[in-house]
Image: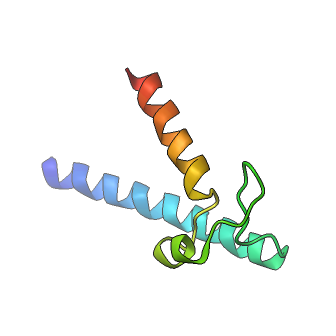
Amino acid sequence: EEEFSLELRARDRERKLIRKIDSTIDRIDADDYGFCDACGIEVGIKRLEARPTASLCIDCKTLDEIKEKLQRG
């Protein structure tokens, strides 16, 4: 049962990553790759090298994570 649970989580992560990759390819095709979805500034080459599917700049991502933590309690 534990192995089955781990397999399901791994598949879920893979599905999410595939969606992010597809979205990134769409952004490249639309010449919108490398710009923050929230504020519109450039995401930054170092961030894109570390996470090529990043759609938020580091500042907006940090704010997003803070909001998420506050919502969880």
x, y percent for residue 52: 56, 74
Residue at (14% x, 48% y) in the render: 2
Q: Quadrant of residue 13?
A: bottom left
x, y percent for residue 45: 59, 77
Which color scheme does this rendered protein use?
rainbow
- Residue located farthest toward the top when viewing the structure as drawn: 73
Foreground: 22 or 72? 72
68 relative position to 41: left or right? left
x, y percent for residue 70: 44, 25
- Residue located farthest toward the left when viewing the structure as drawn: 2
11 relative position to 67: left or right? left
Residue at (55% x, 40% y) in the render: 63
x, y percent for residue 16: 51, 58
Q: How many marks?
A: 0
Residue at (51% x, 46% y) in the render: 62
Foreground: 35 or 26? 35
36 relative position to 5: left or right? right
Quadrant housing the C terminus? top left
Compared with 68, 36 (above or below) is: below
